[in-house]
Image (cartoon, helix red, strand yellow):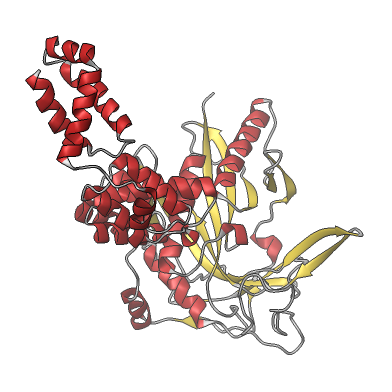
Amino acid sequence: MEWEIVIGLEIHVQLATQSKIFSGASTAFGAAANTQACAIDLAMPGTLPVANEEAFRFAIMFGLAMNSDIGKRSVFERKNYFYPDLPKGYQTTQLEEPIVGPGVTNIELADGRQRAVRLHHAHLEEDAGKSLHEDYQGMSGIDLNRAGTPLIEIVSEPDMRSAEEAVAYLKKIHSIITYLGISDGEMSQGSMRCDANVSVRLKGEEKLGNRCEIKNINSFKFVEKAINVEAERQIEIIEDGGKIPQETRLYDADKNETRPMRSKEVANDYRYFPCPDLLPVILDDEYIDTIKRTLPELPDAKRDRFVSEYDLSSYDANVLTSDRRTAEFFEIVAKTSGEPKLAANWVTVDLAGYLNKSDTSLSECPFTAEQLAGLIVRIKDGTISGKIAKQVFEGMCNGEGDADSIIESRGLKQVSDAGALEKMVDEVIANNQTQVQNYVNADDAKRPKMLGFFVGQIMKASKGQANPQAVNEILLKKLNEQ
C-alpha cells in the first residue's frame, strides 16, 4: 500500500508591538516573572480591554504580503476552556470574521519544485501566560508576563504532502514576518510556534483521514521530525487494523515520538460567543491602501531582483533572501566589493559555515559586511590568492581585525614580483629534471595535468603566497624553452 501524508499548519506568531493587544503592559522579552502583567492582564473586576491598533496594522501587513483578502469588518469572540495560565478563563480571539481571509503563497523545495500553499485565514488573538515546572516540592508556577501578548494565528489549508513541504512553508512564513518586521520570529523564545495537523490516506483517495494535532513545536528541525514520526505511527496503526482517533498530541524530542495530550476539541466545545467588551473593528480602503504603500521589498521580489541585478543563480538567490538580515548583509558585500558572485559564495558557503559551526547568529558576527567586502577586494586586486583568503577569513572570524590588518600582521601578501617568481621557477626546474623531461616528451593533451606538479612545488616553496596566474605564465615560458 502506498500512503500519502496530508499536512496543515497552524502557526502562532507573536507580534512585535510595544504593548499588549488589550492593555498597555510591556511585551519585552526576558523580564522577571509577573512584572509585566497589569490589572487587565490579571482579569481584575471592572477592567475593560482596548484594542491595540498596531496589532491590527501588523496583521494587515501580513495579509497583504500573503495576497490575502483583508477583513474590513473583524470581530473578537471569547473562546472558553480552562487555561491554568490565563486568569480570565477564556481567550479573546477571532473566529467568524477574522482580520485576514484566504490567500496563497508559493514555496520552493530543494530540488527546485514549486508548490502553492493556500492560506485559510489568519486571526488576531491574545497569548496565554506560561506555566513553569521547576519541580520545587512538586509545585508549578505561573508567569503572566506573556498573557495578553498579541498573536496572529496563521491557518493553512491541508495542502502539504511531506514534512519537507511543511518546513519549506514554515520557513517561508518566517521569512515574510521578519521581512515585514512584525515579529522577530525567534522560535527559541516562543515568538513563533507551530501546531502541525497530520493525517494519512491511501494514495489516490480524496477523503481525508482523521487528523492528529501536534502542539507547540518550536524549531524547524522538530517540525520535520514530529511530522515524520507521527505519520509513521498512524500508518502502522491503520495497517494493523486499527483506527486513528482525532486528538491533540505532544512531540517528545528526546524520545522522537508523539504522545497523547487530550482528545481533539471542536468549535462547539469552546462555546464561542462575541466578546461583549469589544466592538467590531471596521476598516476602510484608504486605511488598507496606506499600509500597502509602506510594505518593504518581500522575499520573492528580492529573490527575483538578485537574479536579474546580480546575475545570481536561482538557488543562490533563494538561499540569500530566505533571511532578511542575510540578504541585507550580502547586498552590502556585493555593492562594496563590486563582485556579487564572489560575495554570494563567501556569504552562502564560508560565512554560513562559520555561523553554523560556531552556533553564532549573524548579529553576533565578529566582522562587518564591509570588512568581508574588503577581503574580496584583496582577492580581486591580487594582494592575496583565494587559498590565502581562507586564512585571512579565519583570522576575521577570530576577531583579529579587517583583511588588510591580518594580511600585514601574518605576512600573507601574495608574491607577484616577476624577479622573485622567476627565481623560484628556475629552482624548481633545476631540482626536478626528470619531471621536466617527461613534460617535454609528453603530448599536448597530457601537459596541463603535468604542469600541476611544478605549480604545486612553487606554491609549496612560497608557502602559498606566489601569484598563481603569474607563476603559470613564467613556468610555461621556461618549460617551453626546454
Residue 311 visible in image? no
Quadrant placement of the N terminus: top right
Q: Is residue 188 above or below residue 163?
A: below
Query: Position of 78 compared to 310: left or right?
Result: right
**16 or 422: nearer the viewer:** 422
Quadrant placement of the C terminus: top left
Q: Is residue 264 above or below residue 112?
A: below
> Where's residue 283, x and y in %?
42, 81
Q: How many marks?
A: 0
Residue for point 41% across, 68% down: 180
Residue for point 36% across, 37% down: 111
**223 or 363: nearer the viewer:** 363
- Farthest residue in the right direction? 137
> Where's residue 365, x and y in %?
46, 58
Residue 49 visible in image? yes
**216 or 426: nearer the viewer:** 426
> Where's residue 195, x and y in %?
60, 53
Q: Quadrant of residue 230?
A: top right
Q: Quadrant of residue 460?
A: top left
Residue for point 70% across, 31% down: 242
